Structures are given as C-alpha cells and as structure tokens.
Amino acid sequence: MFAANRPRKIIVNADDFGMSAETNRAIVEAFGEHVISSATLMANMPGFDEACEMVHRHGLLGKIGVHLNLTSGHPLSSPIQRCTRLCDDRGMFRMRHTRFRLSKDERLAVETEIAAQIQACLDRGLVPTHMDSHHHVHTEWAIGAAVISVARKYGIKAIRLTRNCGPGISFAHKLYKLAYNTRLRMYGLAKTDYFGSFADVQEILATASCDVEVMVHLPSDGAESILDPSEGPRMERWFRAYQLASYS
C-alpha cells in the first residue's frame, strides 16, 4: 500500500523526448496531466526539432534535460564516426556494448559528441537542467567520466544515478553502482537518493523518506507507460499524492 498521506518529493522523468512524433505527443500530454515533472531530449533523433518547438509552445522551459544518445541513430559530430568501437562503417552508432575503458581518441570523440548534443539544445533556446542517457550508457565508468566533464563545462548540475533499487541487482553490481553514484555525489551531480523504474521504486517510496527519480517511457512496447489504460489511472493518482519536483 502506498503512503498516500505522507508528502514526498519525487522526480518523474520521461525519457526519449524527440525520438518520434508519437513519443513527443505522449510526453506533452503527460506534462499536461501533471503526471511527469521533467523529460530528457534526444538531440540526434527524427523528432528533435518538433520536440523543441513543443517545449516553447507549451511552456516547458526549465523542465527539459539531455537524453545522451551514443547507441542509436547518427552522431551530430564527425570524430566519433571514426571510432570503430562506437560507430559502424556507415557512421551510425553501434548498439550498446559495455566498455571498461576508452582510448584517448575515443574519450575526446565521446566528449565532442556529448557537447554537440548539448549545444543542439542550446541553439534552440533550451538550457538543459539535467542529463541521463539512452540505454543508460552514461553509467559506464569510462563514458561516465566524459559525461561528468562535459556537464560541468556546460553548467549542467544533475546527472541521473545508475539504478540502485528494485529486484535483480547482484552483489557485484551493487558495489559498482555504489561506486558510480558516489562519484556523482562527489561532484555534486546526484540530486536524488534512489533511481529506478516505477516497479523498482515502489518499495522505497512506501518505506523510506528520501528523494527519488522515476524513469518512464511514453509510449514504448514492453516498457512502463503512465498512459497505459490499465496502469495509467492508478499511477497518476499515486504520483499526485506526492510533491512532484524537477531539476530546475
């Protein structure tokens, strides 16, 4: 049972803004229904320009971050296209494969691409308030270092934790997640205590007093959708029992 009478600060972030027209419409609708508090924008995907226009039209400035993408579509910068571990022979991003280290050239290329995606938002009048990533690629140790470096240069003050609650986290992964999230806290970039999907955070929100970020995808096959006919009303009522917050 949810603690509906206990006020709680919670960030509900919709990932993948800019991925497609369908996703854009769902995210704007969710903002209108006050069931999400922020969204993160994919600067290299087909719906990016439309999403930027929607942000201005619907008064969403201050609620939008960057959804760093290094695993899908075409990069915005050229150096990373020459990195064969990151891009294929067509210059498209490869699917995610965990990389424990980056070469000097790869590190510079990743930093250049992150900066290009942030700059694309700034060029359209959007100042990102926070950062996360597609397929959680920013939680890889080597890429995370590049993300932190660029975020600090651009004055982005919040980066999503790596998932640290919910089932299925092994002891080894718990140690890694503790180390990664501790690094974010050392730089003042961790703004919540826990991060996970709706299913992950239910127990935390019911039993602990802490700040939490919840990730949602709207719409996405196989992922949690707060607009799903069966889940939507229940989740909407629950989120409205708490104090929605944003990173701004």
Image (cartoon, rainbow, N blue to C red):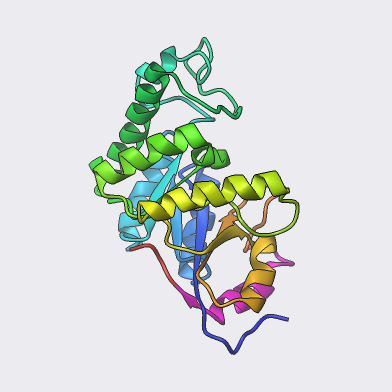
Q: Nearer the viewer, residue 12 or 155?
A: 155
Tell me which residue sits at (57%, 74%) in the image.
239
Tell me the residue at 74%/57% (across/down). 167
The magenta stretch is: 228-244
Can residue 231 be found in the magenta stretch? yes
Locate residue 235 relative to residue 78 in the image: left or right.
right
Q: Residue reaching furthest bottom?
A: 5
Q: Residue at x 46, y 59 (%)?
A: 28
Percent position of residue 139, x then y: 52, 42
| Residue 75 in view here | yes
Q: Position of residue 126 (x, y in %)?
A: 28, 50
**Horizontal relation, residue 139 to residue 232: left or right:** left
Tell me which residue sits at (54%, 56%) in the image. 26
The answer to which quarter of the image holds residue 122 is top left
Please check the rendered image and state whether residue 169 is part of the magenta-colored stretch, yes or no.
Answer: no
Q: Would residue 124 be seen by someone viewing this image from the given angle?
A: no
Decide: is 165 above or below 99.
below
